[in-house]
Amino acid sequence: MVKMSTKKYSNKEMLHAMLPNAAGVDIGATEIYIAVPNGRDNKPVRHFGTFTADLHNAAKWLKKCNISSIAMESTGVYWIPVFQIFESYGFDVVLVNARHVKNVPGRKTDVQDSQWLQYLHSVGLLRGSYRPTQEVCAVRSLLRHRNGLVQTSSSHVQHMQKSLTQMNLQIHNVISDITGVTGLAILDAILSGERNPKKLAALKHGRIKAKTATIIKSLEGDYHPEHVFTLKQSLNVYRYYRQMIAECDQEIEAHLNEFDSRIDVDKKPPPPPTSSPRRGKGNEPDFDLRTHMYRIIGTDLTQVDGISAVTAQMFFSEVGNDVSKFKNRRHFTSWLNICPGNKISGEKILSSRTLPGKNRLAQALKMAAMSLSHSKSYLGNYYRRKRAKNGAPNAITDTAHKLARIIYHLVKTGKQFDESIFHKQETAHQKRVLKNLKTKEKTLGFQLVPCG
């Protein structure tokens, strides 16, 4: 049902409008307020319910008012159905960060918020948040749902460890993973009634490094029915979530199969992997994710040291396979919030700290950067130099920034990663180090003697 607002609103004309057909939408859980330019309707501010029929009525009213572009805040997840329905009507929908469009303090109402959005958008002061295509967003939603399932399943592993500890069964302190082949076999045997430590230890897989005598000691427990019961329920729920994750993997792979290929994998197969594949191990998807990402993105990002197939999937789900909407790599790293800040006043740099952010791809790149601490590659050397100079936190951000620039270049050009291009940079760095050593040599009165 469409309702007209009875609240007061400003009738002042908006000056210097760059987008005269712009509207502003203030989104809530149960209703939305929409403001259009004065003169388009006898009530330029209206509010609608959030039921699907109400949103369609709102879109039709906007069409009647000759609106072509709409600005709305990214409020929780309430904006998603509004965005999708308005976009289906052909509107240019701009999603803006709520922090960037705060109204004048002390004058906040839903009506004024919608009018403020409409005014800022009409004079060209709003920048929309980046949102990939709907097909990529579908994969992103599935991936985020899968991550939630993984986190929940991990909590039930902790519940199992708690039950084992309460029975003084220390098996989870002896083997690295109680959800592996050996751990699950022992847990199933315990729940079936087996209490003999030697028989339980005999279920050890050949790859387990712990000695049999140590495993036998860890399985001498104080069994209580209530703890066995909680162990049973936790194990059942864990397996249920693992089944859900497997079904989610199938759905993700089905969506990935629908994307067009940038590279014919049969004619040009992906390069050999830089590390042993971990398909289906741990929390990684149980399908050939690396080949899918290579086919869709057009380059094998896993050739970059520190970037795994899961990180490549994170890039695809957050950005897609087209980076043309980012003017250059500086804009891309700025969107990720992993570049230096630019706070200047009076021609003086007040701060260059990286702005805070919760970009999922940025977090994944920082994890990739941390994995380079023992790498012998150029990127590994780069991370260690930065860590020695500026500390680990800054080194992680700097290395993530470099990884982002590399990924942007590879995806934009479609080229394959070639580490040899860093040899010149490494040679130049070694020359600088040698020059500094020679300077210190003269200053301290020592003499450098080449080895060999």
Image (spheres, rainbow, N blue to C red):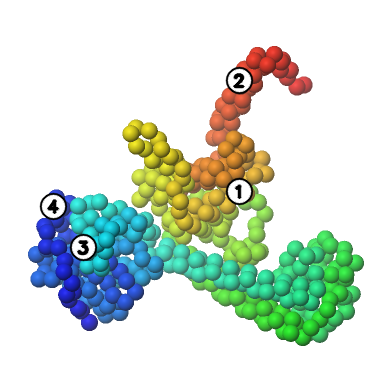
C-alpha distance separating marks 4 and 3: 14 Å
In the rendered structure, the answer to whether residue 146 lies left or right of residue 208 reads: left
Front residue (pair 377, 322): 377
Q: Nearer the viewer, mark 1 or mark 4?
A: 4
Residue type of the residue flagged with mark 4: Leu
Disc number lying in front (2 or 3): 3
- Name which residue type carries label 3: Gln
Residue at the farthest front position: 106
Name the residue type under label 2: Lys
Q: Considering only order in the chain, which callout, 3 or 2, is on the residue closer to the N terminus?
A: 3
Number of the front mark, 2 or 4: 4
Q: x, y percentage for residue 366?
A: 55, 50
Q: Helix, strand, or loop for circle 4?
A: loop
Res. 444 image quadrant: top right
Q: What separation in Å lies between label 1 and label 3 (alpha carbons)?
A: 46 Å
Residue 363 x %, y %: 52, 54
> Residue at horizontal 49%, vertical 55%?
361
Residues packed near mark 4 inside 10 Å, few (<14), some (14 to 19) or many (20 plus): few
Q: Earlier in the sequence, mark 1 or mark 4?
A: 4
Disc 4: which residue: 15
Secondary structure under the numbered disc 2 in the rendered image: helix
Q: Are marks 2 and 3 in contact (CB under 8 Å)?
A: no
- Residue at 82% x, 60% y is 209
Identify the mark at residue 115; answer none if there is no mark.
3
Which residue is labeled 2 in the image?
435
Residues at circles 1 and 4 in contact by the CB criterion of under 8 Å: no
- Callout 2: few (<14), some (14-19), or many (20+) C-alpha neighbours within 10 Å? few
Q: Amino acid at mark 1?
A: Met
Residue 333 placed where, x, y %? 44, 46
Residue at horizontal 82 percent and vertical 65 percent from the top? 206
